[in-house]
Image (spheres, grey):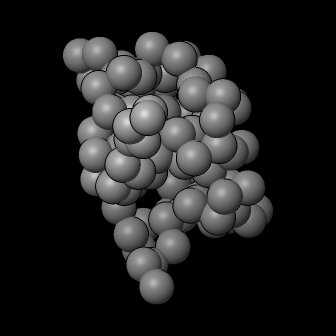
Amino acid sequence: MEERKAPETDQVLRQKVLENFFQDGKLKAMPVKRKKRLIVLEEILKRFECGRTYSEKEVNSIITEVFDDYCTVRREMVEARMLGRNQGGYWRPEAE
């Protein structure tokens, strides 16, 4: 009889993703799977303060500290509603 693996807790999965995709504070590659990609984006989001508006240049600079493809990361963060955007800039929405 084959033994089934217990499902990973969110915290265990999060830790594994961060260990596998980050090295020395830099993102090695963007995960393909959505769930893992969201964990990576949440980690990058920690670099942004709530209640502050950032210019696009500032956002790009912050993301580039972690990953060279800042365009993809910025777009995905906006699409996932982790960052808000309007003509005045970008901001991190308050936690709900």
Q: Nearer the viewer, residue 52 or 40?
A: 40
Q: Quadrant of residue 95?
A: bottom left
- On the rendered structure, is 12 left or right of 52? left
Q: Is residue 6 something one can see in this rendering?
A: yes
Viewer-nearest residue: 86 or 10: 10
The residue at 66%/28% (across/down) is 32
In the picture, measured across the screen, residue 86 lies left or right of residue 37, that is: right
Q: Point out residue 52 in the picture as x, y percentages from the top left corner.
A: 42, 66
Q: Quadrant of residue 86?
A: bottom right
Residue 46 x/y as whole percent? 34, 52
Location of the N terminus by quadrant is top left
Q: Residue at x 62, y 21 (%)?
A: 69
Q: Residue furthest left?
A: 24
Q: Nearer the viewer, residue 83 or 3?
A: 3
Q: Is residue 65 visible?
A: no
Q: Percent position (x, y) of residue 72?
A: 69, 32
Is 41 above or below relative to 69?
below
Q: Is residue 48 above or below residue 5?
A: below
Up the image or down, 22 lies above or below 7; here it is above
Q: Which residue is depicted at the point 58% across and 60% down?
A: 83
Q: Residue at x 36, y 21 (%)?
A: 20
Q: Position of residue 39 (x, y in %)?
A: 46, 46
